[in-house]
Structure formats: C-alpha cells, structure tokens
Amino acid sequence: MAVLEITGLTKIFGSGRLEVRALDKVSLAIQAGELAALMGPSGSGKTTLLLCISLILEPTAGSVVFDGETIYQDGWTGLDVRRRRREKIGFVFQAANLIPFLTARENVLFPLNLVGLDKKAAERRVRELLDYMEIAERSHYLPALLSGGEQQRVAIARALANRPKLILADEPTASLDTARGQKVMEMLKKIARENQTAVITVTHDARMIEGFDQIYHLEDGRLKNQV
Amino acid sequence: MDLAIRDLKLHKGRFLATIIGVGMLFTIVLTMNGIYRGNISDGIAIIAHTGPDLWVVERDRGGPFNEQSSMSEFFHYSVAAVPGVQKASPFIYYPVERQIKGESRRFSIIGYDVFGGMGGPRQLTQGRAINQAHYEMVAHAKLGLKLGDQVPLGLHTFTVVGLTREAVATDGEALVYLSLADAQEILFQRDNEAIRNQRLRLRHSLTQEGLSPAQADKLLPAVQPDTHLVNAILVQLAPGANPAQVAKHIEDWLYFSVFTTAQEIQLVIRGRLARMSSQLLFFRVLLLIVSAVIISLVIYTFTMEKIRSIAVMKLIGAPNLVIVRMIMEQSLFMTLSSFLLGLLIIHSIVHLFPRKILLLPPDTLLTFAVALLGGIIASVLGIWQVLKTEPAMALGGQ
Ligand SMILES: Nc1ncnc2c1ncn2[C@@H]1O[C@H](COP(=O)(O)OP(=O)(O)O)[C@@H](O)[C@H]1O
Ligand SMILES: [Mg+2]
C-alpha cells in the first residue's frame, strides 16, 4: 500500500496577473521503504510540493491521501494535520534547523515529548537514535558547538524519533561538503531500508542519488519523465 | 525539559540585565508603597497615641492637625462640666523650627497639663515624665538629645528629663513635650520691643475712639491679646457615656466642633494625606506600566529571535499551546525574578531612608498580583507573533 498518494495536485499562488502556478496537476505515489528523489531547477516547485505533501500548505486542487487517510480532497478534510505531522512525518531541512537553546539530546527528545512518550522510553529512544546517527558522544552539546554535518545528523535523528511513515528532506546536503553530504544521504538510505520508512528528498546534486528507487523531475510545477 | 528556562539560559546576560532594571523599578514601587503607608502611619501616630475619647476643637475647624484650631484654655472647665465627661484637658500642638545643639531642626511642640492631664507621653524609653510646672522637657529620641541636656527655647532653657519614641509629629518629625504654660510661652512670647509696639498701637486705637489718654491707659491691660490659648481640649468620657450624645452636648452648648479619635484620624487621611496618597498611587501605576512595557519589549525581541525555531516547532507538529506556554513562562519568570530582586533590595535598604518606610505584606501581595498581571499582558505581543508565524518558514534556505 502506498504511504502517500497525491493526485492532480495543483497549487496556485496569487491571482490575476500575479498568478503563479507553482504545482500543476502533480500525481505520484510512494511506498513504504521507498527512496525517492525530487529534482528540478530553482523555482520549479520542489519546496511547494513538500509543503503540500507535509500538510503545511493548502493545495488549490487535487487530493492527498496519507497513510490511508484522505487529508485533502479539494479542501482540507478536517483531520488534525498537526497531529499527523508530529506522529507520522519527519522533516529534514537544508539547514539543520535545530532548536538552538536545546542540546542535541533534547532536540531529539522534543518530538518524543510532544507525543507524550513516557520518560524512560523516551530516553532509551534518544540514546538509540543518537547511536544510530553516530553522534552519541556529542549529545550534550548545544547545536552551535556542533559541525554542520553533526547538526544534520542530529536533525535526522529528530526526524526519526517518532518512527515516522514518511521522511521529507529539503536539500539536506546543500549546506554540506561532498563527503559529509554523502554521509547524510547514506543515512537516509539506511533509514529507508532498515525501517521501512518512505523518504522523499529534494536535491540538486545528481551524484547524491545513486541507488534511489525513484527520481522525479519537476519543471515549472509539472512532473517530467519519471525515471 | 523546560523550553522557557533553556532559552533564557542561552541569553543569560540580557535576561539578567532586564531583571536588574525591572527589579529596580519594582524597588521604587515597593518603596512608594512604604512611603505611602509610612506617611499615613506617621500622620496619624500622634492622634492615635494621644487617643482621647473626644477632641474638642474650634468650631467648624478640622483641627488641630488638619487645620489650625485656637480656643481659650479655660474652656476645659466648661467642657469638664458637661454631663458624661469624666475629664477634660487642654492640649497644644504646633510645629516649629528651632536651633537644637547649634543645628536648625524641625519638630512639633506638645503642651499639656503635666499634673494629671491627658496628652503627655505614656511610654518613655529613658528618664521620667515632666513633674515640674516649668523648664522640663521630654523629647523624641530622633532629636538626638540625651537625658540632662540643656536646651534653650524662647526665653528659657529646658532640661531633658525623659526620652520617648512613642509617636511622631504629623509630618514625621520629632515631638517635644512641655508643660502647657511653657508651650504657651514659647508660642506667644514676644520680646520687649514687640510688646511696647503693640501697646502703642492699641493705645492709639483707643484714643482715636475718643478716650482720653488716661482712660486709654486704664483700659489697656484688658484689651491685651489673650495668650491663654490652646489648640484642642481632650475629653475622657465617664464609663457608659454615649460619645455621640456628649459630643452633641458640647457642640450645642459651647459652640465647638467635636470629633472622636477615629473621626480625627479620618480628617487627616482625607485631608492632608489624601493628595499625597493619590499622587503616590498615580506614580506607582505609571511605574508598573513601564515595567510591563519593558518586559513586553524584551519578550518580543526574544520571541523574534527564535521565530525560526518556532516555525520549526510548528512544522514538526508542536501544538500552539506548547509554544505559547514557553513565551508566557518566560514573561512570568522574568516578572517574578524582577519582583523578588526588587523585594530583596527594598528590604536591605529600608533602614537607610530618613523617613519612615512601612512595608505591609498585603501591599506587597497586591503589588505582586498587579506585576503578575503585567507579566501576562507583556507576553501578549510575543504570543501574537507566535500565532502568526507560518510553519512553512522553516523550510527552504536560510
Ligand atoms: N508563498 C509564496 N507566494 C507566492 N509565490 C510563491 C510562494 N512560494 C513559492 N512561490 C513561487 O512558486 C514557485 C515554486 O517555488 P518553490 O517551490 O520554492 O521552488 P523550488 O523549491 O523548486 O526552488 C516559484 O515561482 C516561487 O516564486
Ligand atoms: Mg526550495
């Protein structure tokens, strides 16, 4: 079963002469454990697509079915999208976007607290994730004291915390050097394979997408020759 | 994991600077509470401590503390004769500024009947009460006099026989107790030149009215101004006497105004002290508003600085409540810390003030409640920012 299925998704910004058709009838489906890359030139609608998929931005038309629930069907269907985000979707950004006043450990703990996991289980999960991301020895540092690559790994640990069905990553390697970028991509692959998590990642860098299951090309809001 | 505190920890410097600044504002507010209470406490101390059942004063005057009141001393015999009155004593109270030990000092003189009359000091810290008709004084310890000190006042020199801390004058300054006659003398005593001038003027007026110089000289002693004046007559009621009834009796028969001690206190609070009270209240309200505005601005900048984090929190699904609570907690924590600092400062400097600062727990509690309310209002600006932040802001480049 597809974790995510979008059909005819359209997003129009503005109106009249200022109208921008950022997404134009985009349809795609992604299965559990599948690794998908989203590519395309700047301004082609990649971020907009992620925002619509992640239930943050309201589409203009089309439908979004996520984990068996119809979230959008020519209008919000009234489900609590924020709850679904914190329980079922993990986010990785271009910049790590860690909360600067929380340590690495606490940044990972934050989403676990949001879903009300008990203290012991949460602690265990945090340790497990930081080990998994090979960042355990830096767990008590504030983000400012971590390198870009380390921050990004903490961010991935945070995204994984609640065992999401779907991970959305917007240019997660853009601010890293090749070696570190490669490492982050390896991590994402590992996650998809080992946890049966669907991963959609936006990237510019063709070298990063070796071994991906699907590669989508966006241009002017339209999907092109799916590979 | 407390988000509010963790964020403040990262901005220790600014946080501390804010609570020091706002803490000092709270110190001023608390000081003003104390000045207000201190002024009232000082303002009514002499009335409360003298505490007769009734004050008889000049008709239609709120005397002798709120207004001047002047009456002939001998009326205390008439008052004593009113049914229900057990005892009536003459009483003098007036502020002066005189040299004490070579320094010009403000204080108030109380003149009372030292032989069994009311109005004298009841508790002495040292020495004894006045037991001679003349030239002895009991002074408030504030004046810095010692037992046995010789103090020239007017034409005579007085010996300090007792010290007290019982009450202060309505303006918070020291009290000096003298015998009635001594107080009258200091109040009315003129030097010889002034007396001669006055006699000449009176004599002139009389001869202008058609009297011969010999007749005028004969009349002169009778038309001299009366110096046997007092400011009030203190009344002690007979057991079981009805104060209102006795008061009415005195007012009707003797053409005076009569107040109970409670009424006398109210006269001063509504009169002399009222302006000061509203002045201080107004100022305190202003300061509390300033405190709230400062905290509000600091919270707002704190919030704006972490707006991206707030977008991230929303994006990963944090309910608004979690974020709003963080802002609110910061505001309240800042208010609370500032208030505690203010409280600490005022309690460590309260003894340094020259005038009485009376800190009452209910005042402090009320100020705290108002401050807390200010803290809640101060977080509104930040919370409004939180609510309108788009989670989409977290995505995309820096
Ligand atoms: N909030 C917005 N308001 C108006 N236009 C927008 C907004 N967000 C994106 N766009 C427009 O939509 C198009 C796609 O943008 P975006 O999804 O950010 O592209 P990408 O991430 O591929 O660079 C662009 O033309 C952009 O200007
Ligand atoms: Mg983008």
Image (cartoon, helix red, strand yellow):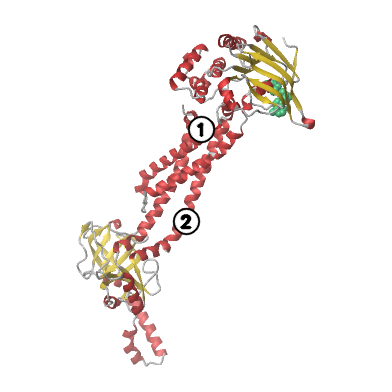
Does mark 2's beta carbon lie closer than 8 Å to ligand 1?
no
Name the residue type under label 2: Gln
Task: Compare residues B242 and B335 and report the one nearer the observer.
Answer: B242
**Residue A205 place in picture, x, y as percent:** 67, 12
Q: Chain of mark 2?
A: B
* Rendered-image quadrant of the C terminus of chain B: top right
Task: Compare residues B385 and B74 and report the one nearer the observer.
Answer: B385
Q: Is residue B218 above or below residue B191?
A: below
- Mark 1 secondary-structure assignment: helix
Query: Quarter of the image holding residue A92?
Result: top right
Cα separation between marks 2 and 1? 37 Å
Numbered label attached to residue B279: 2
**Residue A45 place in picture, x, y as percent:** 71, 21
**Residue A161 place in picture, x, y as percent:** 53, 18
Q: Which residue is mark 1?
A: B326
Q: Is residue A127 above or below residue A58?
A: above
Q: Is residue B29 above or below residue A106?
A: below
Query: Quarter of the image holding residue B217?
Result: bottom left
Quick check: A175 left or right of A162? Answer: right
Q: Along the polypeptide, which appears first: circle 2 or circle 1?
A: 2
